[in-house]
Amino acid sequence: MSGKPIDPAAPRILIVDDDAGQRSLLTTFLERNGHHPLVADSGEAALKLLASAPVSMMISDVRMPGMTGLETLRRARQLHPTLPVLLVTAYADIREAVGAMRDGAVNYLSKPIDLDELLRTVEQITGTQAPAAAPRDEQPLPANVVAVSPLMRAVFHDAALIAPSESRVLITGESGAGKEVLADAIHGWSPRAKGPLVKVNCAAIPETLLESELFGHEKGAFTGAHQSRTGRFEEADGGTIFLDEISEMSPQLQAKLLRVTQEGRFRRVGSGKELQTNARILAATNRNLETLIKEGRFREDLFYRLAVVELDVPPLRERREDILPLAAHFIAQFGGDKTRFGPAVIECLERCAWPGNVRELRNAMERAALLSRGGVVLPEHLPTRVRANEGAGPASSSEAQRLEEIERDAILQTLKRHDFNRTETARTLAISRRALTYKIQRLRELGFPVDPPVA
């Protein structure tokens, strides 16, 4: 996972952000793509650095304590009138970011950052581009992971890219799609791999006990607290903590979690003593946190702290190339290497919508292995819901082609409407940015105009 050697002539890019996780992510990413990053944790520090060292461009967060990103932009342009500045902004600050274009910002990116869009923007601003044929370091997938589809392999590629950084990661996706498997991979590929990986399902623990579970408690802190207990954040010190179903956390507990993300500090229940943790936070949810923010049920500041980078695990129906390899993996696990599928079973598996995703497929294969007793799996060994798709046929080639044309036109029109901003395009089309990126790559290969025109 080491980056490329930095060329002395490579563009020097100043990263300005008070969030250490964000700085770590951008530094790692830009180094791997041949750029020379410099970092500043405040606007004041950025201005001092600009006064002493020339840079090719500046990437600055908007919301920072002390001098804001907008004020840093104005002061920086006074020092260097032609300095290109790229703003990184939360969705709620986009109007301010657009207004800042008048003050010299050349562009803005919405949080969580889309790394593909970031690289494309940096290359356009600096006039550099990595060789198109440059090989990428591909991290071998863990032994228990099956990912054949290009979409899922792209997700794991991104996970391997961000794993070496200290950045927090928000993993989204439907229930059963494989969010925990992705978290396992990120921890295993990180420098913290030898440390603990502590998992907490926030939806499975009563609200009254979740605070104690996360932060621990002192003896006598509440009824039943007969002795002191270490919390999961203490256990995860030096390693990783995976907070699953983060959307189920109460607003009061969200405020306490926010402090941990900002300072790494917390208190056990019933204690006035502050403790420190150096745990990397990975969070996951199957719900749309931006919708919950609008409804006042999830803190916006916590969302942007957790989602330094966001990875979306696509549902199984969008990566159908993975269905049979996953089924074969599970049937071998539960039934042994001699268990095999009958032709009719393969058709059932391929036609099923799998609303429960990989978890549903796994359970179906466990059932089939038990009923087939290690022999040939037949349709009657499958759950009724899976067999119900037996008579459903795939769309005709003409229907599939028409659907592909409709999707292509929708993507091209929406990209143009949003000035080729992928974040806004994905939000409008109600798909993940990773899915949009993969579709854009396919359209680019076919010669369609998916990139902004060169000025």
Image: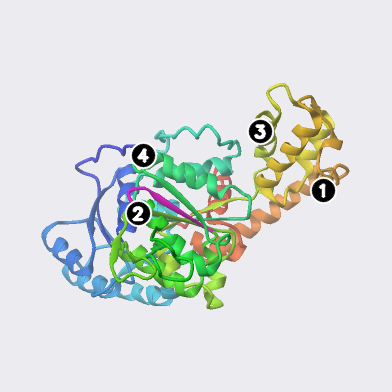
Visual colour scheme: rainbow
Residue at (11, 59) in percent of width and height: 52
Dot 4 or dot 3: first in sequence order is: 4
- Answer few, some or many: residues within 10 Å of disc 3's Cα (few below 14, many 20 plus, some between 14 and 19): some
Q: The N terminus appears in which quarter of the rendering?
A: top left
Residue 194 - label: 4
Q: Kindly indicate whether the residue at mark 3 contacts the one at mark 2 (C-beta within 8 angstroms).
A: no
Residue type for callout 2: Val
Residue 372 appears in the rendering: yes
How packed mark 2 is, by other alpha carbons closer than 10 Å (few <14, some 14-19, many 20 or more), is: many
The answer to whether residue 299 is left or right of residue 76 is: right
**Amino acid type, label 1:** Arg
Q: Position of residue 227 (x, y in %)?
A: 40, 61
Residue 397 falls inside the magenta stretch: no
Q: Secondary structure at mark 3?
A: helix
State the residue position of label 3.
325
Residue bearing the label numbered 1:
385
Residue on which disc 2 sits: 122
Q: Reply above or below: 187 against 204.
A: above
Q: Where is residue 392, by image quadrant?
A: top right
Question: Which residue occupies the extreme right position in the image?
Answer: 391
* Residue 159 locus on image (x, y percent): 45, 45
Q: Residue at x 32, y 68 (%)?
A: 105
Residue nearest the viewer, comparing 107 with 265? 265
Gap between marks 4 and 3 measured at Cα: 30 Å
Q: Is residue 183 above or below residue 334?
A: below
Q: Which residues are magenta?
A: 236-244
Q: CA distance from mark 3 to mark 1?
A: 20 Å
Say if mark 4 contacts mark 1, CB within 8 Å: no
